[in-house]
Image (tube, helix red, strand yellow):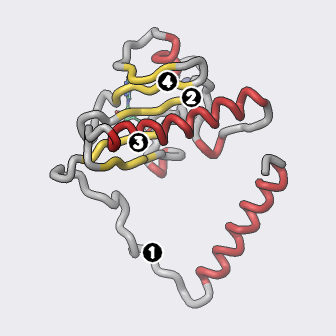
């Protein structure tokens, strides 16, 4: 994709500090880290974000599976080696949710137990449901999920 900074990193036109690379996935350090070791896990296929991922071909499914696998491996690598005490996974979809680079990526952020990063990023309990609203919303979401699962025929 023209003008996509992560596609340029994938093509080698822009440098990055890589921690993993295969035919399908690349991972590198975030240039503006929330914590030391903050990584971005990125599919080489240009999808804007999770909502835009298409799983129509074998190749797309393989890219997506490896992407999710490496997110898990990166979190596990951080923790199991004792590099950090914990990790947060963050992924933003669309500008209103904080997405600034329009190429799908997962943040894996090591946590050291003594940092000043505040989690949760969002205030839990800030939204309040009216009576019956939670059930109505859950029904809407359940229908949407069911529709996509049926359409995609992957389960
Ligand atoms: P998001 O807000 O989820 O879209 O995050 C985009 C992330 O990409 C930010 O944390 C940026 O610091 C990071 N970023 C932008 N440009 C680069 C770059 N050239 N190399 C590494 N990370 C980058
Ligand atoms: Zn891209």
Most extreme residue toward the bottom is 131
Mark 4 C-beta to ligand 1 under 8 Å? no
| The one of 19 and 118 positioned closer to us in this rendering | 19
| Percent x, y of residue 135 | 64, 81
From the top left corner, tell me how far across and down residue 83 is, in percent. Answer: 26, 38
The mark lying in front, picked from 4 and 1, is 4
Residue lying at 40% horizontally and 75% vertically, measured from the top left: 125
> What is the quadrant of residue 24 in the picture?
top right
Q: Callout 3: 10 Å neighbours few (<14), some, many (20+)?
A: some
CA separation, marks 3 and 4? 17 Å
> Residue under circle 2?
43
* Earlier-in-chain disc, 4 versus 1: 4
Single out the mark in the foreground, 3 or 1. 3
Q: Decide which of tag 1 and tag 2 comes sooner along the chain.
A: 2
Q: Nearer the viewer, mark 3 or mark 4?
A: 3
Mark linked to residue 127: 1
Q: Residue at x 31, y 37 (%)?
A: 81
Q: Secondary structure at mark 3?
A: helix
Give the class, few, some or many, for how many residues have Cα within 10 Å of label 1's Cα (few <14, many ≥20).
Answer: few
Residue 89 at x, y = what percent? 42, 47
| Mark 1 or 2: the one toward you | 2
Q: CA distance from mark 4 to mark 1?
A: 36 Å
- Above-or-below relation of 124 to 73: below
Which SS class for mark 2?
Answer: strand
Residue to which mark 3 is pinned: 76
Disc on the earlier residue, 2 or 4: 4
As measured in the structure, the alpha-carbon distance from the residue carrying label 3 to the one carrying label 1 is: 32 Å
Q: CA distance from mark 1 to mark 2?
A: 33 Å
Q: Which residue is mark 4?
A: 26
Q: Nearer the viewer, mark 3 or mark 2?
A: 3
């Amino acid at each position: 994709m023209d003008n996509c900074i992560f596609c340029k990193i994938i093509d080698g036109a822009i440098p990055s500090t890589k921690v993993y690379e295969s035919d399908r996935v690349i991972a590198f350090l975030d240039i503006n880290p929330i914590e030391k070791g903050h990584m971005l896990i990125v599919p080489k296929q240009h999808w804007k974000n999770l909502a835009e991922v298409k799983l129509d071909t074998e190749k797309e499914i393989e890219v997506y599976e490896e992407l999710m696998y490496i997110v898990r491996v990166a979190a596990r690598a951080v923790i199991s080696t004792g590099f950090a005490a914990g990790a947060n996974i963050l992924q933003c979809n669309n500008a209103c949710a904080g997405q600034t680079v329009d190429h799908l990526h997962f943040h894996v952020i090591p946590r050291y137990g003594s940092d000043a990063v505040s989690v949760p990023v969002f205030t839990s309990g800030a939204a309040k449901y009216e009576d019956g609203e939670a059930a109505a919303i859950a029904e809407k979401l359940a229908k949407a999920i069911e529709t996509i699962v049926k359409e995609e025929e992957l389960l």
